[in-house]
Image (spheres, helix red, strand yellow):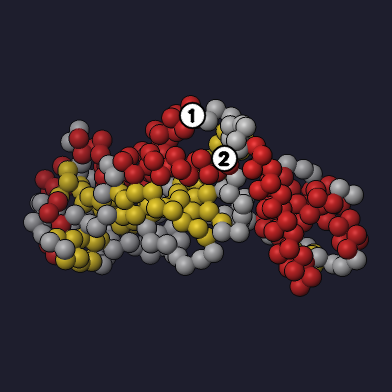
Amino acid sequence: MDQLQAIRAFARVVEAGNFTRAADSLDMPNATLSKLVQELEAHLGVRLLQRTTRRVMVTPEGQDYYAKASRVLRDLEDIDSSFNIARSKPRGHLRIDVGGSTARDVLIPLLPDFLARYPDIRIDLGVSDRSVDLIGDNVDCVIRGGALDASSLVARGIGQATMVTCASPEYLRHNGIPAYPEELRNGHRLVSYLSPQNGRAVPFRFERDGERSELKIEYRIGVNESNAHLAACVAGLGIIQTFSYAAGAALRDGTLVEILDEWRPPPYPFHVVYPQNRYVTHRLRVFIDWLVECFPARVAG
């Protein structure tokens, strides 16, 4: 038995929550992964995992072993990295998750610069407004906007997006231009962004002279994906609040018109988030540093 390989296999099963996802992330057959874990259990003389037809449960002994083994794996990666960083360029595979409009309008246009700087790094880009399980889905980092939940994740600020309220010229011709936020209650149609996490409509927010307000109005249509949310506004379905970087091209060519610009919503913070208990590889470190350098200007719109 290759004990180090078996420890890595066991740790990945714990993190992924099942054998199938763990095997996929390690690029090995499910049977091979299962055999490695069985050999490790036989070597230790304890059961680390409780297997059922539907799920894998970590035993108390398995939890204790995982806590100690994961520290060893991080130390080994740290040792390898300390010798390699000074002598080699970062290389390998990065798995990144990002929201739809942020990918289209901010990250992807910036990526040629990153790939030119680091030609030996390969990127898998997961694009969705839905949250991912950083550990279970084996994602290196997530780029997300908005308030952060208290958790065991590490977050680093990478800028603030400008928010705008806008509508199509056709909609405004038929419904008039609201002069102040409260006027939205007088028969205007709102296209709300629905949180992919809980399905609730995100309130319309406004700020003027340091005073902030929030409007919760029944919406005409709700959309839970950022690019489709913008498309609904372009189609004349109603008024939206969105990022200036997403609506910028449509605002410049007249497809959309900004309204209530004296009551622009507060800036929207963005972060890059990664697991606290996972070793930060050289390739992830340079990606995060690059985001801190390049992302803020682009996301500001």
Taking the spot 52% from the left edge, 60% from the top edge, the residue there is: 153
The location of residue 17, given as percent across then percent down, is 68, 59
Taking the spot 77% from the left edge, 43% from the top edge, the residue there is: 28
| Residue kind at label 2, given as amino acid type | Arg
Front-most of residues 43 and 163: 43
Taking the spot 22% from the left edge, 50% from the top edge, the residue there is: 164
The location of residue 135, given as percent across then percent down, is 61, 56
Front-most of residues 22 and 65: 65
User: Circle 1 — which element?
Assistant: helix
| Residue kind at label 1, given as amino acid type | Arg
Classify residue 12 as left or right of residue 200.
right
Tell me, yes or no, if residue 38 can be seen here.
Answer: no
Classify residue 173 as left or right of residue 48.
left
Question: Spatial distance from mark 1 to mark 2, Cα to Cα?
Answer: 12 Å
> Number of numbered discs present?
2
**Label at residue 185:** none
Question: What residue is shown with label 2?
Answer: 283
Question: What residue is shown with label 1?
Answer: 117
Taking the spot 57% from the left edge, 40% from the top edge, the residue there is: 283
Compared to residue 211, the image places residue 22 above or below, namely: above
The location of residue 80, given as percent across then percent down, is 69, 43
The location of residue 184, given as percent across then percent down, is 16, 61
User: Circle 2 — which element?
Assistant: helix
Q: Residues within 10 Å of mark 1 (few under 14, many from 20)?
A: few
Are the residues tagged 1 and 2 within 8 Å (C-beta)?
A: no
